Amino acid sequence: MVGRIPIMDVHPVVDLGRLPAKATVGEPFPVSATIFREGHDKLGAEVVLVSPTGERRPPVRLVKQPDPVDRYLAHVTPDAPGAWTFEVHAWSDPVATWQHAAGIKIPAGIDVELMFTEGLLLLERVRAELSPGPDATVIDAAIAAAKDTERPAEARLAQLEADDVVAVLAAHPLRELLSIAGPFPAYADRERALYGSWYEFFPRSEGAVLDEATGKVTTGTFATAAKRLEAVAAMGFDVIYLPPIHPIGEVNRKGPNNTLTPGPEDPGSPWAIGSKDGGHDAIHPDLGTFDDFDAFVARAGELGLEVALDLALQAAPDHPWVTSNPQWFTTRADGTIAYAENPPKKYQDIYPVNFDNDPSGICREVMRIVKLWMSHGVRVFRVDNPHTKPLAFWEWLLREVRRTDPDVLFLSEAFTKPPMMHGLGAVGYHQSYTYFTWRVARWEIEEYLREVSSESDHVMRPNFFVNTPDILPEHLQYGGPPAFKIRAALAALSVPSWGVYAGFELYEHVAVKPGSEEYLDSEKYQIRIRDWAAAEAEGRSLAPYITRLNEIRREHPALQQLRNITIHAADDENVLVFSKRAELPDGTDDVVIVVVNLDPHGARETTVHLDMPALGLDHEDSFAVHDEITGADYTWAEHDYVRLDPHHQPAHVLAIRRTS
């Protein structure tokens, strides 16, 4: 039912309020609504945030926006994890109505004393609600001015319009015809749901050894992979993500480069889960034991890394499920079980699970598996192809895990249509892979940054992976080392979560064939041995640049938020400019301006044009900036010349130091 003061189109509201909007501890999130009324009287509006314990936080005033018409906006910040709600309040504002009328009538000599009398009555109502103190003193002086008929009307009005009086009246509004919309749900997750740097590696490759004489490869283990963790942590990563660590199927096993003719030593794809050695609740014997895994998780924790484990709900043909629960799969007309396909790709080594066959049994088994790995210290799961499973299943699983273990996070690997990606986020996924990998031109990057930061942010948090074992984008194949720097800077600085698959820092860029995004000698199908130390010693590693990007992210709270990005202009279409701004606890702002040359093949020079109010500055201001990459200092203003050579410096990362 519409209230006396209509409040419509409240945002963020997900699925008519059935599901909570995305929020994160410490990050302001926007609440907006269309609010209007009949006639010309003024109205006021505010948002009230209610904590998981039921505590009502002080209201935050909703501010009328210039566009669209009658749209009001405020930002509120949850300070604890859990299920929050918010309400939107609107009311008739008699004080604002009087202020508007008095500002017109009294200078014009119309109804002067009547206007002061009406203002006096309103001031006395406000004063009756105030305790003794500075605010009461200000209103007492205003009341005296309204009564003082000996003073000129202009002087009396000036005192009633003084900044201190206006501020007190705004802080203590008279609410008439109060209308309330809500409560609406929002769930605040822990910080890692929003902010973090991810690194993916295959444990079987880390510490693997090649016998040059025989050509035989000895696989890496959890123990050898743990030795690589120190280098990953030193680069500033927060999450170490492991592809599936379970036994790998032997039936239809894939060979190098996705061939169907594996040799006896070929290890197969980790996503073809299950063999005589066990399924999702087992560890590949080559990697070690559960004790070894526990030691790996413990070492990661000592280095400040969280371990993310792949949750791939599928089975190899020789997975124990195929024998124990064949009803969990799809049987074709010829009696065979259907393997996975994503034309033109075929995955003969994988059977998809059919969630419409024995759904309760599947749910029990998946929950058992998730709880098992949680008990071994896994608090983050990267979920493989969740868009090929029913949304209702994910809503149930994520709700149940959140109910008992709200700190456990899930990353959706769903490169699919936006409705499904947003739907997965709405039902509980904390993060999602995105289309970032395929956004290359400036206009499409700008468009996508606006989308993920202010259009879909209430249902989906983005994680910008620069590459994956499945995705070697064309710009990395042909852009040389500058392309790797450019994409790392874009991903790390534009959104709070970004990710790197091992080998990116070595500029691995060769595709299996022209036009393909598959790596040559893909690590999905074979062990890859990398000489990290030699690459760094010879200057063939991007690790120092990645390290600096992650350091900058940790130093600047503005880069740890999603919804605070502003796109600025540049005359060259190959130069992207954006800024991020966050308010610090001491009341100051952290502001970072990022300028990126998107062309990996040549230097670009141009003029950039800054949206000064978005930076908290006036149009005529000049200000000092410090380049966090090079250490250089500059004085900038609204319009600035830049030159960026992608081979030496593809990006400015400018922290505003002071304004004048």
Image (cartoon, grey):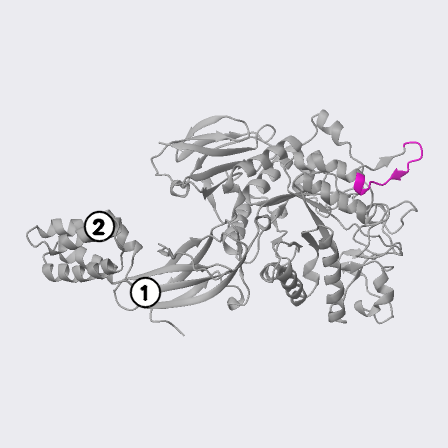
Stretch in magenta: 212-223
Count residues near mark 2 (Cα–Cα under 10 Å), then give few for <14, some for 14-19, many for 20+: some
The magenta stretch spans residue 222: yes
Residue 551: x and y in percent read 58, 35
- Assess whether mark 1 and mark 2 are in contact (beta carbons under 8 angstroms): no
Determine whether the residue tagged by mark 1 lies in a helix, strand or loop: strand
Q: Is residue 109 left or right of residue 332?
A: left
Of circles 2 and 1, which is in front? Answer: 2
Q: Is residue 466 visible?
A: no
Residue at left offset 57%, top offset 56%: 460
> Which residue is identified by label 2?
137
Image coordinates for residue 600, horizontal then vertical, percent: 61, 35
* Mark 1 crowdedness (10 Å alpha carbons): few <14, some 14-19, many ≥20: many
- Callout 2: helix, strand or loop? helix
Tell me if residue 227 comes above or below residue 169 in the rendering: above
Instruction: Kindly report the secondary structure that dominates the magenta region of the rendered protein.
Output: loop
Q: Is residue 197 magenta?
A: no
Give the Cα distance between marks 2 and 1: 26 Å
Residue drawn where x is 86% and y is 60% of the image: 317
> Quick one: label 2 or label 1, which is nearer the N terminus?
1
Provide the residue designation for mark 1: 91
In the picture, residue 407 is in which quadrant?
Answer: bottom right
The quadrant of the rendering that contains the N terminus is bottom left
Give the percent coordinates (x, y) of residue 269. 81, 50
- Marks counted in the figure total 2
Q: Nearer the viewer, residue 215 or 202?
A: 202
Q: Amino acid at mark 2?
A: Thr
List x then y, in percent, for residue 100.
Answer: 22, 57
